[in-house]
Structures are given as structure tokens and as C-alpha cells.
């Protein structure tokens, strides 16, 4: 898995690239990269799901681990660009009530600046 990151103002955008899956074979790497940013207090991380069409329990585990890390370190995580199939799973597992999910990266970045 090739994970791309870029900075927009004080927000880090992480794109889970080069694959259309967040699953057992790459979830641990994704978790490590997310936690690397989220252990920095007050960090702001956007996970861009553009191109991700499949997620399994390992992928959900990585996201939940990142959410836990963000709460422990008083940092922030938001998700965006989630396709309909993945969103159905997120809703089925009721994770849409615990994650801040927005339409796209611009909305995420703007929501951070409006919260300050």
C-alpha cells in the first residue's frame, strides 16, 4: 500500500493509495501511519478514502485504533470521499455516529478551520 500525505494549512491529508482495499494485508501499515500523526497532540488528520471500494474487519480495526489514539492524544481525525458500498458498511456498524465523515477533503479542511 502506498500511503500519500500532504499538508493543507495545519491539516494532514492521508490518501490510502495504490489499492482499492483497506483489509488484512495493509491495515496494519495504515494504522501505523495514522497513529504516527495522531500521537502528536492537537494534530488534525483527514483520511481520504477516494478509490477505496472494500474494507474488512482489519480495516475497521485500524480506523478504530486511530480514533482511540486521537482521543488519547487530543488530536482529531475525519474521514472523507467514502464510496457508497463502504459507507453502507460504516452505517451498518453504526460507525458513522463516532467518526466525523464529510463529503471531500475541502469540507474536512474547512471544518477544522471553522472549529478553531
Image (cartoon, grey):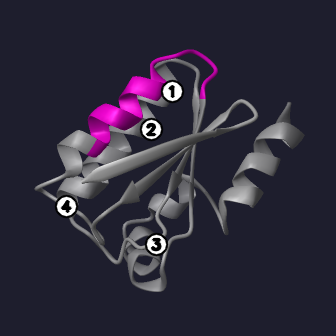
Secondary structure mainly formed by the magenta segment: helix
Q: Which residue is mark 2?
A: 67
Circle 2: element type:
helix
Look at 88% across and 42% down and name the residue there: 114
Write down the region rendered in magenta: 30-43
Residue at x 50%, y 71% (from the top left corner)? 82
Q: Going from the N terminus, do you reach mark 1 or mark 3 first?
A: 1
Secondary structure of the residue carrying numbered label 1: helix
Of labels 3 and 4, earlier in sequence is 4
Circle 3/circle 4 CB separation < 8 Å: no
Q: Residues within 10 Å of mark 2 (few under 14, many from 20)?
A: many
Label 4 sits on a secondary structure element that is loop
31 inside magenta stretch: yes
Label whose residue precedes the other's in the sequence (2 or 3): 2
Label annotation for residue 91: 3
- Distance Cα–Cα, label 3 vs label 4: 18 Å
Q: Which residue is mark 4?
A: 23
Amino acid at each position: 500500500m502506498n500511503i500519500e500525505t500532504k499538508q493543507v494549512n495545519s491539516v494532514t491529508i492521508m490518501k490510502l493509495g495504490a489499492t482499492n482495499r483497506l483489509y488484512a494485508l495493509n491495515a496494519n501499515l495504515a494504522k501505523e501511519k495514522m497513529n504516527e500523526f495522531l500521537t502528536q497532540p492537537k494534530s488534525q488528520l483527514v483520511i481520504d478514502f477516494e478509490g477505496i471500494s472494500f474494507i474488512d474487519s482489519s480495516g475497521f480495526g485500524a480506523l478504530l485504533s486511530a480514533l482511540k489514539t486521537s482521543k488519547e492524544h487530543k488530536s482529531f481525525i475525519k474521514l472523507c470521499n467514502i464510496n457508497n458500498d463502504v459507507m453502507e458498511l460504516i452505517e451498518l456498524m453504526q460507525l458513522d455516529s463516532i467518526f466525523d465523515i464529510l463529503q471531500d477533503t475541502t469540507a474536512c479542511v474547512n471544518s477544522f478551520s471553522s472549529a478553531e
